[in-house]
Image (spheres, grey):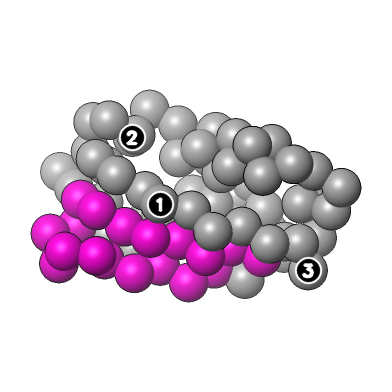
Amino acid sequence: MKLSSEDIVEMIKKKLPDAKIHIEDLRGDKDHYHATIESKKFKGLSKVQQHKIVYDAIGHHMGTTLHALMLTTKEQ
């Protein structure tokens, strides 16, 4: 079963409750998304560290029920 944008937001919010999240389904197939995420928890972290937090939130879904997730992360 593929993930909806709402599912992705819910998973990220569990890890980053303060986050402002915008999800775009790039192909309309619920398999290729772009997420823009702003969070205070990103302060002082490198982009790699910020992205790791997000990918940890998605967990085992990456590569299985979710094929591609492009990230833009920003600190608030």
Mark earlier in primary sequence (3, 2): 2
Residue drawn at point x = 74 percent, y = 41 percent: 46
Residue 74 percent location from the top left of the image:
68, 62
Which numbered dot is residue 70? 1
Q: Mark 3 is on which residue type?
A: Gln
Q: Which residue is mark 2?
A: 61
Nearer to us of marks 3 and 2 is 3
Name the quadrant containing residue 8: bottom left
Question: Which segment is the magenta one?
Answer: 21-38
Nearer to us of marks 1 and 2 is 1
Q: Quadrant of the C terminus?
A: bottom right
**Is the C-beta separation of discs 3 and 2 under 8 Å?**
no
Is the residue 16 above or below the residue 54 in the image? below
Q: CA distance from mark 3 to mark 2?
A: 27 Å
Q: Which residue is mark 3?
A: 76
Extreme-right residue of the structure: 44
